[in-house]
Amino acid sequence: MKHFKIPEWESSHCLPHCVIATVDYFDGPAKAQTTHDEIASLGISRSKWLWPATAALLLSENNLFVKLYDNDIEYNHYLQDGIDWIRRKYGEIGVGHLRQHFDEERTYKDTEAMLKDKRITVYEKDISEEEIFNFANSEDTVIILNMDHSAFYKLDKAPAGHYFLVNGVKDDKIFLTDPIYIDKVVETTAPEILASQQTLNNEVQHFVVTQIASSPKDHVSTV
């Protein structure tokens, strides 16, 4: 089982914690940071959420290869049409959500950079159960999964996307680190993961991160 060092950082944003813990796991040049200034040097904000393309770039900048599985954001369309694509897909609520939680200018810049980055492959589909089980116990691979926090913890609250780190699998059990709770490992199954994605309309992103390229470069795959 993998063990992740979660930074003791005053933020409730899960994806930055996962990115920093992944970089630290591979002992990259930017190890897990604990000061606000050091975290800011990685381009991570305490006040804004982390755009998936930005997360992929931060991992790539630390010499890691990234597979981004995203059946939500169509990055080529977003790059071409920008906020109009958000409006068509999500309406004005989606536009407000983007502008409230993300640095809009950076989402464009980082989307463009990600699509050109030879260490990042984008798949416009969900990650498969087979891939989770194949790579979860590999010491050379880190998986970051996105699920509905409310459904996963069976809370009577509105759906909310939340990122977890995969520690490993044993039999049919999948063990995850919740990055908001330092050193907390939770147990789940593939059907439970699937169910907690469906409550988000399967609009989720997952990351598979390695130190070596696992396949020939194909920037965007829709297979």
Image: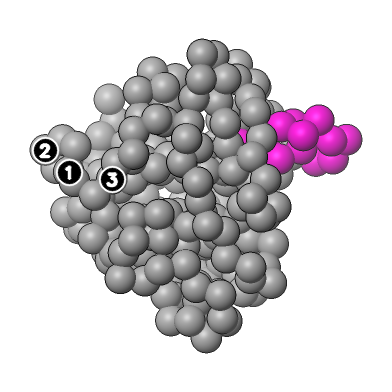
Discs 2/3, front: 3
Q: Determine whether the residue tagged by mark 3 lies in a helix, strand or loop.
A: strand
Identify which residue, 158 or 119, lies in the foreground: 119
Residue under numbered circle 1: 213
Identify which residue, 216 or 165, lies in the foreground: 165
The answer to whether residue 24 shows anywhere in this view is yes
The answer to whether residue 149 is magenta is yes
Q: Determine whether the residue tagged by mark 1 lies in a helix, strand or loop.
A: loop
Q: Which mark is residue 39?
A: none
Report the Cα–Cα distance between label 2 and label 3: 14 Å
The reply to whether the C-beta atoms of the residues labelled 1 and 3 are less than 8 Å apart is: yes
Residue ID at (56%, 81%): 35
Residue under numbered circle 2: 216
Residue segment shown in magenta: 147-158
Quarter of the image with the C terminus in it: top left
Point out residue 16 in the picture as x, y percentages from the top left corner: 53, 61
Count numbered badges in the picture.
Answer: 3
Report the Cα–Cα distance between label 1 and label 3: 7 Å
The reply to whether the C-beta atoms of the residues labelled 2 and 1 are less than 8 Å apart is: yes
- Give the image quarter of residue 57: bottom left
Point out residue 160 in the picture as x, y percentages from the top left corner: 70, 44
